[in-house]
Amino acid sequence: MTVPGPRNDFPLLKTQVRTATDAAHGSADLSKRMETQQVNIYYGKRHAVQDVSIPFYKNLITAIIGPSGCGKSTLLRAMNRMNDAIPGYRIEGQVLLDGQEIHTPGTDVITLRRRVGMVFQQPNPFPKSIYDNVAFGLRVNGLVKSRAELDERVEKALRSAALWDEVKDRLNRNALQLSGGEQQRICIARALAVQPEVLLMDEPASALDPVSTAKIEELMFELKKDYTIVIVTHNMQQAARVSDFTAFLLSGQLIEFNPTPQLFTRPADPRTEAYITGRFG
Amino acid sequence: MKSRFADRIFVALCLFAVLVVIAMLAAVLGNITYYGWDRLSWEFISASPTHGMTAGGIFPAIYGTVLLVLLMTIFVVPLGVCVAIYFSEYADRSSRLYRWTRAAVDNLAGVPSIVFGLFGLGFFVQFVGGGVDKLFFGGNLTFRQPAILWASLTMAVLTLPVVIVSVEETLRAVPQSFRDASYALGATKSQTIFRVVLPNAMSGVLTGGILAVSRGAGEVAPILFVGAAYFLPHLPTKLNDQFMELGYHVFVLSTQSPDVEATKPLLYSTVFVLLALTFLLNSVAVAIRARLRVTAGSGR
Amino acid sequence: MSANATTLPTSDTGVARRRAWDWAIEKFIYLSSLVAIAIIALIFLFVGREALPVLTSPKVHEEVTLSTMFLSQNYGTSEAPLPYVWQPVGVHPKYSVMPLLLGSLKATLIAMLFSAPLAILAAIYTTEFAPRWLREIIKPVIEMLAGIPSVVLGFFALIVLATVLQDLFDLEYRLNAINAGIALGLAVIPIVYTICEDALTAVPRSYRNASLALGASPWQTAWKVVLPSALPGVFAGIVLGFGRAIGETMIVLMASGNAAITSWNFAEPVRTLSASIAAELGEVVFGSPHYHVLFFLGVMLFVITFTVNWIGTIAVSRLRKRLAGADR
């Protein structure tokens, strides 16, 4: 399988260009699945994210790039409220899912996390069987009633993660016995099993080898059809390959948000240009 | 090179200390094995004592000990696991509840074993037993007396810190990434603990239980007045029965036997069985701990 | 927050029930920690409750009071030549606690004199000088020693050690403080050893390297650099060992002779606080003055071990601070 990218994957480029053009003309069939509006995040006294407003469009991939410590992971984790347990954490501004604020006291965090799934940087499958890993979210949320239905949903999730053929004969094997790339795809399948609307991916391929990385990126194109994806990555080429829109964060501030081809070929801000040309990392 | 010579003397002294310790252990184990191995046989383990404790076997004592630690485990493991979960997953380190619970468990570990015996007598037998008799048996003397129920509860209280320490250690060792993954899928805290964290810490529960059992089988002072008996015509069948017990048997045979020389063979073999049981349990616990440390490392 | 933002409306089905379970389980866990606190409180309470009549009950005071327990008495009979006698069973019960305290002290002293040097030197050898293969032997040896039930040690002391000592030193009494003390020492060695070994291995490698680089020999390094740094831990080990020895029951019950003799002769039998409780509780009449006095002895024992452990922890943290300051 060739590694997809703007230079040798014409269908993708066409989609990207069309999306960008439509966005520019304001006639796009673009609806916002999630959105942050003037979000400020504090860890105690540290102002980690400053006044960031980013739209995340439905069924598209939005990348958040920036140097280490710029706040991109923090922002991502705010979107499924995984930061809540961190002492000293404080958030201001709005984070909306389908137009609804997720930080009100009445919000059901459990449902939120089912609707907004997350894949982590280090693959972290549970030390259980492959089947039990993927089924975990379904069982815990009480989403299926029969074993047959569970089997079906597990198969579906594994297919979505392009892993079914590889593991269908060893579903009872311990997930930790798989390679890093396969483990990450288990984690993706596990997240998909509960049928989220948004998938947050925090540097999902940074711990993987190039071949596994390519497989994950390929997977993301497929997943885009059914899910809204937000990916945080420090790998600019990956962002350029994979995403439709890109946000560039620096020291907690949003420097630029644009359709990906535009941001990478004609960045609007000199700082963006400096980053993507590697003048600082 | 006077200093080098003095050096060698001092190091030799230290080595001598080590050898003394090893030698004493060898003396104790050797003596017991040598005299105790003789009488050991299937009959010894499966038969009851006869002829005034000079012949026969010690089956009732083995049975009583097993029953005691079984009951004890039923009480101590769930409670110990819950407190360990509290320490590891729920507690706010700065809260008063946490500090008091910590202090309580630490102090519990330092209570002399005979004081547990006093507690067993004053609280379980007299107070709880008396209350049970009044409420359920119309004042008839049923539970307000030495009984295996009270002995196992007393032992459970004594071994509680052992279980807590072991379980808490393994709970804390579970990587945070597992909890994160679970929360991100929409699990509640208790679901995360019982479906992900605790299963991963089972080795701690197991070793804690085994170490508690080993302590429970070896301690005698707490059960002196709370249920153990020297000779009973039948095995304990009800919760308010008394029971024979290996350690207690050793104690009584050693100190109150009318003819020490005649009972010595039985006594030695009983000690051997008790020692072998304790060592077996401890070795199993150590082995589990070591093995799971290895696999946990390789899984990363 | 903008005016038209609303909360996420529908939760998934069953979330409310899961939350309810979660809440219940959390409360249950908190309850278990309360149970742990309750247990220790109950121990204080119930042992204390049965001991209280010694202080408050006039009926008990007819037979025994605090002053008869602690102060010297003039018994006025020929059978009690000394001012401190523990003889609760008899026509004129005598309840002086001093022989028992002295007995506990004597046995514990022997135990510490015997075990502390051995354990400390052994720990030094293990951490500083021992070749790897020997280290792998010592560790299980100590663990095995720690795993021996105290009743077995008591048995060994009673049947074997007593005879050996009596033959070796031509002692008058077979069961005495030395016999019990040595057996106690065997029980205490693992405690002192383990804590000392931890303390010694915690000393940073850099200290040793600096000392060796200055030309000191390994022994000088161990004795003058490593051991002083580990002193808080060593002290803690000794204190905790002491606490364990004083509270130990079965060994002294079986090996010390159980005679309440008030003397500083270590080759004579002793009767400790713990052994007295164990030996007499089985035969007291429930509710009698003797019964309450035994519980009072239990309280004393409890207080002593508690204080010793407490002193140990405080002294350790003070020493640690002082040494840490000196190192800076």
Image (spheres, coloured by chain):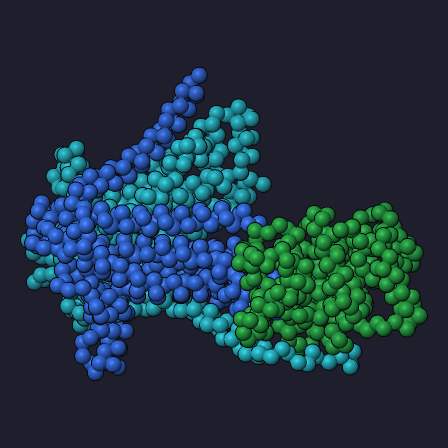
Chain colours: A green, B blue, C cyan
The quadrant the N terminus of chain B occupies is: top left
Choose between C99 and A17: the one closer to the eye.
A17
Q: Quadrant of residue B261?
A: top left
Q: On the picture, is C46 further left or further right than C259?
A: right
**Residue C123, position as x, y percentages in the image:** 40, 37
Residue shown at 36% from the left, 54% from the top: B211
Residue shown at 44% from the left, 46% from the top: B290
Residue A186 visible at all: yes
**Residue C286, position as x, y percentages in the image:** 17, 69
Above or below C267: residue B114: below
**Residue B178, position as x, y percentages in the image:** 58, 59
**Residue A249, position as x, y percentages in the image:** 81, 58
Above or below A86: residue C193: above
Residue C177 visible at all: no
Above or below A236: residue B240: below
Q: Quadrant of residue A230?
A: bottom right
Residue shown at 21% from the left, 64% from the top: B227
Q: Residue furthest top?
A: B1
Choose between A101 and B251: the one closer to the eye.
A101
Q: Quadrant of residue A22?
A: bottom right
Choose between C238 and C328: the one closer to the eye.
C238
Residue shown at 53% from the left, 38% from the top: C204
Choose between C301 and B109: the one closer to the eye.
B109
Q: On the picture, is B293 further left or further right than B133?
A: right
